[in-house]
Image (cartoon, helix red, strand yellow):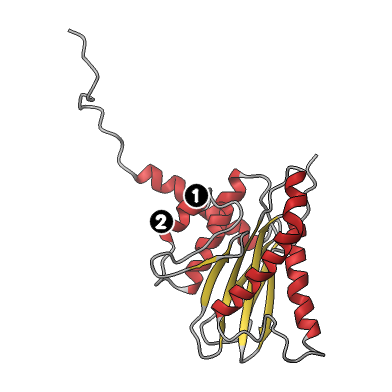
Amino acid sequence: MDNITNRTKMRIYEKPGDRVLSIMSSGNLSLTQATMALIDDDLHLNESHPSRKHLLNCETLYETVRYIGTKVRIVEARDRAALEADGFDFNINLIVGGQIAGLAPEVHSIYPQGNSIHASRDCPYLQIGESKYGKPILDRGFSYDGTLMDALKFGIISMDATMKSNVAVGPPIDILCYKTDSLQVKMRTRLEQNDPYLTEISQKWQEGIVRLVRQMPVADFSKTALGFATAA
């Protein structure tokens, strides 16, 4: 039997007025925890070693992402061989988003190898974990120029589609909405099972799909399809 537990997949680090960082994870929980432990160790050791590099003193978001990538590689060097010897993949994926004062906000995705890609106008969103069921919704509606609240709703609908198709995915859903240049966390929440807002979004999405399908034109069967012969 699978050992399935609910664990938060989002960590938030904040220095109000200076930076806000969010790290989201998918994959092997032990690898995520090992990576985050290395990051937290540096933050703790910085108290007695002020010159030590850590998550909150990188000068840019890209440098921050590279720093986190090095921690993933440390865990990989230590654990990959043992995992693969027992038939397990080295499976950890991270999304790092946020803003440092004076710079534009950024969102990056970090692979198990420690390298990364970043979101852009041409590719305005990033996904990790079970993505195939929710991706078509984001492809059709999510826009770089859309509003923050529309982005939130598309994200929740994408998650709802995933939960409908994969019973292993479900609440709680951690949400962070960040406004550019605010440099502090103001909008954060968690949607639990049977949350009224989550239920309402799911129901309206379901009803809306059915309503739109019924409004669409029916297929025209009066034309002879190519490749089909009619009886003489």
Q: Earlier in the sequence, mark 1 or mark 2?
A: 2
Residue beneath disc 2: 140
Q: Is residue 177 visible?
A: no
Q: Position of residue 125 (x, y in %)?
A: 48, 64
112 over 146 or under it: above or below: above
Q: Residue at x 39, y 42 (%)?
A: 214
Relative depth, front residue between 196 and 34: 34
C-beta proximity under 8 Å, tags 1 and 2: no
| Left or right: residue 13 compared with residue 130 | right
Between tags 1 and 2, which lies in front? Answer: 2
| Left or right: residue 104 compared with residue 212 | right
Three-letter amino acid code at the position of disc 1: Glu
Q: Residue at x 47, y 68 (%)?
A: 119
Label 1 sits on a secondary structure element that is helix
Q: Position of residue 139 (x, y in %)?
A: 43, 56
Picture quadrant where residue 100 is located = bottom right
Q: How many neighbours does mark 1 have within 10 angstroms: few (below 14), some (14-19), or many (20 or more)?
A: few
Three-letter amino acid code at the position of disc 2: Arg
Q: Which quarter of the image is occupied by the N terminus?
A: top right
74 over 43 or under it: above or below: above
Work out which residue is located at the far left of the displayed protein and give it: 232
Q: CA distance from mark 1 to mark 2?
A: 18 Å
13 over 28 or under it: above or below: below
Relative depth, front residue between 192 and 114: 114
Q: Which quarter of the image is occupied by the C terminus?
A: top left
Residue beneath disc 1: 207
38 over 1 or under it: above or below: below
Picture quadrant where residue 112 is located = bottom right
Q: Residue at x 61, y 92 (%)?
A: 17
Q: Is residue 1 visible?
A: yes
- Residue 216 is tagged as none
Label 2 sits on a secondary structure element that is helix
